[in-house]
Image (spheres, rainbow, N blue to C red):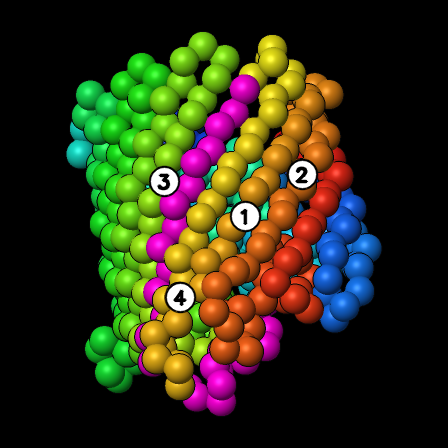
Amino acid sequence: MRIRTIMLAALGCVSSTVFAQSSVTLYGVLDEGFDYTSNVASKAVYEMTSGYASGSRWGMRGVEDLGGGTQAVFQLESGVNVSNGAAGQGGRMFGRQAYVGVQNARLGAVTLGRQYDSVVDYLAPTTANGNFAGYLFAHPFDNDNTDNSFRVNNTVKYASPSLGGFRFGGTYSFSNASGFANNRQYSVGASYENGGLAAGVAYLHANNPGGTDNGAIATNDASFIASRMQVFGAGIDYTFGAATAGFAYTNASYRDPVTNGYIGGSLAADGNTLRNLRYQNFEVNGKYQFGPAFFIGARYVYTRETYDSTAGKVEPHIQSAGLMADYLLSKRTDVYVQGVYQKVGGPSTHSVLDQAFIPGAQGVSSNSKQFVARVAMRHAF
């Protein structure tokens, strides 16, 4: 009895120590505003929308000290539509992120679950949409996933610690199918920060993305369903005083693509099924901080779109420009205004690919031009 009492007391001490070195944090962002969109079914659209400059969300993250500088970590993050209270990401309970793993200050972190790929982690922060502006500033159809239109399921991720400003990592996502490569994904990336300089590079490969519901990129996540998807790119930002200027290049290609998700319409060009689709995005962006409470940001993107049709190889070009102003009412609450204009030029094959579409708009434009304006409030907790 005495030995049992001592053991219980010892376990109680250990348990108290563990709990004292553990924490769980509840957090979130609510982004709600009013949008005007031109040229949707030949009419203007006025609507209330949620989660554009920042995806509206709530979540929990936790850490437990395992000793020796190692910690167990987890994160559960749910997207939410503030306009109607619905869950985001196809109604998933924790559609934005859901993972568990371990981290060490010297060795890095290994996590398992639904997570962001290396394009989002390392390359996207050099773009305007992946840094300060969000959804409306994404490249056409978010073709390169720099605005994380999809997350990757069944994923093992490694993220290194900062090594003199240099970080690197990668992901591998299991298909969870009888065909090992059917809807799997892998990606690698790296970034470097030193003083005012920030640079990033990444590569992503997916087989049959969107082809299955339980694979790496689920059907209701994918912007394009294709037999193969590849994305690579690099970007650089430099901050000097109150100003930041940046450039990013991304290249996204799809084999045997069809549209999915929010795009709508048919990819068929002149009645012929497409075989290859490629986007090359060239972005110039900038931001100026007028004191701690107010900034203005802008970006211009030139996109070369190349696809195969009955007319042979067709190469429309897409130009889009965006402007944003943001004012902090407090440390956790701000109001912002955004405007984006897009124009599609070059040859046409009478498909949705030749019509303007700004990510976040209610639908594809009825012609080659589209404009979206947004006024919104955002609160973080």
Q: Which residue is mark 3?
A: 248
Residue toward you, 162 or 296? 296
x 80%, y 59%: residue: 44
x 27%, y 34%: residue: 191
Which residues fall within the magenta stretch?
262-288
Secondary element type, mark 1: strand
The answer to which image quadrant residue 296 occupies is: top right
Query: Which mark sits nearer the N-terminus, 3 or 1?
Result: 3
Give the image location of residue 68, x and y in percent: 20, 28
Mark 2–mark 1 Cα distance, whole angstroms, equals 13 Å
Q: Is residue 361 left or right of residue 131?
A: right
Give me the disc on residue 338.
Answer: 2
Q: Is residue 139 magenta?
A: no
- Residue type (three-letter) at the residue carrying disc 4: Glu
Secondary element type, mark 4: loop
- Residue type (three-letter) at the residue carrying disc 2: Gln
Which callout, 4 or 2, points to the residue nearer the camera?
Answer: 4
Give the image location of residue 55, x and y in percent: 59, 46
Query: Which mark sits nearer the N-terminus, 3 or 4?
Result: 3
